[in-house]
Amino acid sequence: MSAAYNIAIDGPAGAGKSTIAKALAKKLGFVYVDTGAMYRAMGLYFDRQGIRMDDEEGISRACGDIRISIRYEDGTQRVILNGEDVSDRIRTEEVGHLASACSVYAAVRQKLLSLQRDLAASTDVIMDGRDIGTCVLPDAQTKIYLTASVEVRARRRYKELLEKGKESSLAEIEEEIRARDWRDMNREIAPLKQAEDAVYLDSSDMTIGQVIDAILEAASSRGLSPDRTGR
Ligand code: DC
């Protein structure tokens, strides 16, 4: 087990992982690592190169030309793709789908694995994604599987878009979420699933505060000291 304390949060798109993880990281003085952003940067690269998402050979070859790193600005993670900060550019639905599509390939996952493990080896991190508890950090002291119903996740996303002034179709968002869930859960390598030792949380009827409390509780029962959790 690493010297650092690691919290792994996995779950489907739109379950609130990043909101929760960011707030917890701030409260605990941990570093928040958003692994989805790394897959998004990879997807953006392939798309810019005109490589189709069903071209596994082309994607695997191109992996050698990609350098992904992250840095922190005022505690916020920035993703750097071959020297360019793409953190803002990758936050679209379209790039989310590109990320999901390219993340099924071994070469893409392999590329990011050591970066993710290195980040957690000597630093207290809260890392979110799809395979953190099952594959990236199997020894994480606290593992959470955070989910919510498709309907609730779609409604949250719809509201978020509306707040940004973007009209969208709730039915379409629901369909997209179902498709992404299916792909993330059914791929051959490192599919999204609950780790055996993960705490299952369904946030459909929980407030952000309640989810944070439940995770703090889990962490304090798994060795995180009371002066960190306030418990
Ligand atoms: O969390 P997100 O929406 O930013 O992730 C985008 C996609 O990246 C997600 O649909 C699947 C992939 N992903 C993954 O395969 N493994 C991770 N640990 C994180 C994300």
Image (spheres, grey):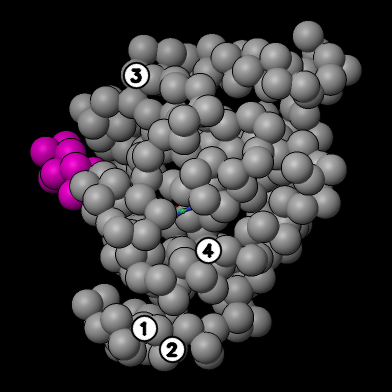
Mark 2 and mark 1: Cα distance apart in space: 5 Å
Q: Is residue 210 above or below residue 98?
A: above
Q: Is residue 207 left or right of residue 214?
A: left
Please give the residue where the numbered disc 2 appears in the rendered image: 62
One can see residue 46 in this view:
yes
Q: Residue at x 53, y 63 (%)?
A: 38
Q: Which residue is mark 3?
A: 204
- Please identify, in this view, whether the residue under mark 4 or under mark 1 is nearer the observer: 1
Query: Does the segment drawn in magenta span residue 175?
Result: yes
**Numbered disc in front, either 3 or 2:** 2
Q: Secondary structure at mark 3?
A: helix
Name the N-terminal-most of marks 4 and 2: 4
Some atom of ligand 1 lies within 8 Å of the CB belonging to the residue at label 1: no
Q: Which mark is residue 38?
A: 4
- Residue 47 figure quarter: bottom left
Return the residue at label 1.
59
The image shows residue 175, relative to residue 214, as above or below, that is below
Identify which residue is drawn at 41% across, 34% down. Answer: 194
Q: Which quadrant of the picture is home to ligand 1?
A: bottom left
Q: Badge 4: few (under 14), some or many (20 or more) residues near its Cα, within 10 Å?
A: many
Predominant secondary structure, magenta span: helix
Instruction: Note whether ligand 1 is within 8 Å of mark 2.
Output: no
Which residues, given as a range, are shown in magenta?
Answer: 170-179
Give the x, y percent position of residue 81: 57, 77
Q: Which amino acid is tagged 2?
A: Ala
Check if mark 4's residue and mark 2's residue have beta carbons within 8 Å.
no
